[in-house]
Structures are given as C-alpha cells and as structure tokens.
Image (cartoon, rainbow, N blue to C red):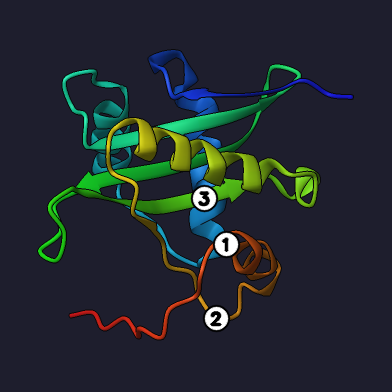
Amino acid sequence: MPDLTIRPIESADHDAWRSLWTSYLDFYETTVSEEVYQVTFKRLCDSEITNQNGLLALLDGVPVGLVHYIFHPHNWKVEEVCYLQDLYADPTVRGTGIGRALIEAVYAKADQAGKPGVYWLTQDFNTTARQLYDRIANVTPFIVYRR
C-alpha cells in the first residue's frame, strides 16, 4: 500500500506545485499570469499570511495532488468560513482517495482554526469529481454570477 502524506505547501515545492496547479487550470481551460503564479505561491508559503493556505498530497514522496483554501469573514455567521478554492489530483491517482483525503484535510484545518463551515464550487460538467462531492458534502441550489 502506498504511503500518503498531506502537508502544507513549502517553498521547496514550487516546481511540483506549479505543475499541479497548471494542470488544474488547464482542466478548467484557463490560465493565470506569471505574476499570479509568483504572488500566490509566495502567499501560500508565508507563515504571516494565515487566511490563504495550501496543502500537497504526496504518494510515496511524490506530489500527486493539491488543495488551496481561504479563510474569510461571513456576514451570516460570527465565525469565519473556509472556501476550498482549488482541488486537483493527478489523473493517474484519481479514484484512489487522494481528492477525499485533501478535502478531509481542509475540513480538519478549518475545524482546528474554529472555522467549521467549508464550501466550494465546481462546474456542472465535472461529473467525476461531483460523485465524490455528493458523498462528502451537501450540494446547494445557488447559482454563481460573475462580473
């Protein structure tokens, strides 16, 4: 059985993180500028920034997945909530529990920080991921609008 480790993203992870995040962005047919790559990675590794976070999943020491999550205030709650912004598992490990483990790690981090409300978005065509999401969270009737 392979050894799965989930841990915070570290500065030495830049190349693996960038490769995984680029694959995630490719899946959603989008890109970000070089400046966004650099600023995002710096924020994720900065111990002074506690609201923007990232975790890597390593299988036998090899990075195979990532998750980014953000803590923020919520006008309908006293405590802050957690937005799980990006979740990605390499296609070669999908269906092995990596995605679930990353989500559960975010749940644990949110609980530990006293921010138990966790939410995320996905596109309706992401049927494979939605099979997992439907088992571990509640789908909402909200529609997202964007300027």
Horizontal arrangement in the rendering, residue 144 relative to residue 146 (left or right): right
Q: Amino acid at mark 1?
A: Phe
Q: Nearer the viewer, residue 136 or 50?
A: 136
Furthest-right residue in this view: 1
The residue under the point 69% across, 68% down is 131
Asked if residue 103 is positioned above or below residue 40 in the image, the reply reads: below
Q: Nearer the viewer, residue 113 or 55?
A: 113
Rendered location of residue 96, percent (x, y):
80, 44
Q: Which mark is residue 27?
A: 1
Rendered location of residue 35, percent (x, y):
24, 41
Could you say whether the residue bearing mark 3 is in a helix, strand or loop? strand
Asked if residue 37 is positioned above or below residue 141 in the image, the reply reads: above
Mark positioned earlier in the residue sequence (1 or 3): 1
Q: Which residue is mark 2?
A: 124
Tell me the quadrant of the picture where the C terminus can be found: bottom left
Q: Which residue is mark 3?
A: 87
Q: Nearer the viewer, residue 34 or 144?
A: 144
How many other residues sit within 10 Å of disc 1, few (<14), some (14-19) or many (≥20)?
Answer: few
Q: Amino acid at mark 3?
A: Leu
Occupied quadrant, residue 34: top left
Tell me the quadrant of the picture where the N terminus can be found: top right
